[in-house]
Amino acid sequence: MIGHRDDGAGAGGAGAVLEIACDESGSDGENLTGGNTDVFAHAGVRVPVAAAADTVREIRGRIRSPATEYKATHLLREKHRSVLEWLLAPGGPMHGRAHVHLTEKAFFVVDRVVALLLEDPVAAVVLFRAGREEFGAEEWARFLRAANDLLRVRGGEPESSVATFFAAVDGLCGAHAGTPAARVLGRLPSRRERAEAYRAGLPGGPSVRIPVLNPLLPAIVSTAAYWSAGGRRPVRLVHDRQNLLTPERLAWIEETARRDGIALEEVRLVVAREDPRVQLADFLAGIARKAASDELNGRGDPALAVLLRPYVDRASVWGDPRSAAVLGLRAAGLGADASR
C-alpha cells in the first residue's frame, strides 16, 4: 500500500510513527522442502536514510568489489570478515537498530500441517523432535514433502495430494508403531475430511488466497510486532517490492496485525536498490539466514553467532533446540529462552 515518504527513522516524540525498512532472504515460496534453503530470514532496520546511505558507501569502500549491487555474500567472504564484524559489532552502524526473524522451514511445515489437522502445537513439537530420529532421514524427508504438497496453494490435484499424504502417514504408523512420532501421526487419519476440505477450497483464486505455507507473511507480522512493542508504538514497514505482496495480501497483513494489537500503520513497497535502508535489511537477512542454516546443520561459526545474537528474534519459528541455544532464540515447546 502506498503512503507518504518519511526519510527519518521515526524517532520523534510520542505518537511518532517508526519507519522500519525490511527485506528477506531464503524465499522459495511454498516449496519449503525441495527448495534451495532450509532457513528463511526476515530483517527490519531502523536507520535514517542518510545514515543508511553512508553505511552502504562505507561497505562499498571497504570491500571495493566492481559489482553494481552488493549482497550478503560479499560480506560473508572470509577476506571481508573485518567488514562483517564492523557492521554487526556493538557500536556498529546497525547495533540496537535492527532485528531479524528466523524460520526453520522443516519445522514450519510440521507446525502448519498439525495446526490444520489437529490444532495442537504440542503435538507438532513432539512430531518434529522425534520424527527424523525415529523414522530415519529418508522416510522423514518423504513425509515432509507430502505435507508440503498437501498444504501448498499451487499444488497438484486435490485428491492426489491428500491421498499421497495419508499414504505416507499410514506407512510410517505401520513401520514405527508405538513411537512418540507415530502416535502423533496416528491421530491424523480421523481428520482426513479437514485435509480434503482444505484442498477443495484452493482452486479459484490462488493470487488472492493467503498461503498458509509461505513464511513471509507471518514474518512481516512478527517484525511489526517487535517494533510496535506490544502496540505501544505505531510503525510503518517499508518493504522490498515482490510479486507475492499483492494488495490483497498487504491488506491481510495489516488487518492481522491490528487484530493482534500491533500498531501497524501500513506496509509500503519500494525498489530495494533505491532505498539504502532496505539494502541494509537485505544484508542482515542474508547474513542471518546463512549463519542460522550453518548452525542448524552443525557447521556453525561461533564468533558470528555471538555477533548475531543481539539481532535475532527469540520468538522465531524454530524447532531445533541445540541450534536455538547457540543463536539465542527460543525453540518451540520451551518455556524459557533456550540460551539460558
Image (cartoon, helix red, strand yellow):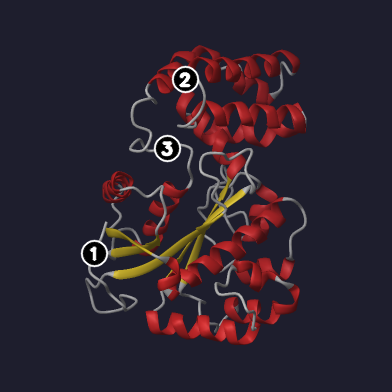
Marks 3/1 in contact by CB < 8 Å: the verdict is no
Spot occupied by residue 142 in the image (x, y as percentages of width and height): 68, 27
Number of the label disc, if any, that sits on residue 211 = 3
Q: Nearer the viewer, residue 46 or 302?
A: 46
Q: Which amino acid does label 2 sit on?
A: Ala
Visible residue check, residue 329? yes
Report crowding for label 2: few under 14, some 14 to 19, many 20 or more residues within 10 A (C-alpha).
many
Number of the label disc, if any, that sits on residue 314 = none
Tag 3 secondary structure: loop
- Separation (CA) of disc 1 from disc 2: 39 Å
In the picture shown, does residue 263 fall above or below 183? below
In the picture, which quadrant includes the N terminus? bottom left
Q: Which residue is drawn at 59% across and 36% down?
A: 125
Q: In the figure, is residue 172 to the left or right of 254?
A: right
Q: Name the residue under label 1.
A: 3
Which mark is first along the chain, 2 or 3?
2
Marks 3/2 in contact by CB < 8 Å: the verdict is no
Q: Which of 242 and 118 is in front in this view?
A: 242
Q: Which residue is drawn at 33% across and 38% down?
A: 208
Number of the label disc, if any, that sits on residue 195 = 2
Report crowding for label 1: few under 14, some 14 to 19, many 20 or more residues within 10 A (C-alpha).
few
Q: Residue at x 55, y 72 (%)?
A: 69
- Separation (CA) of disc 3 from disc 2: 15 Å
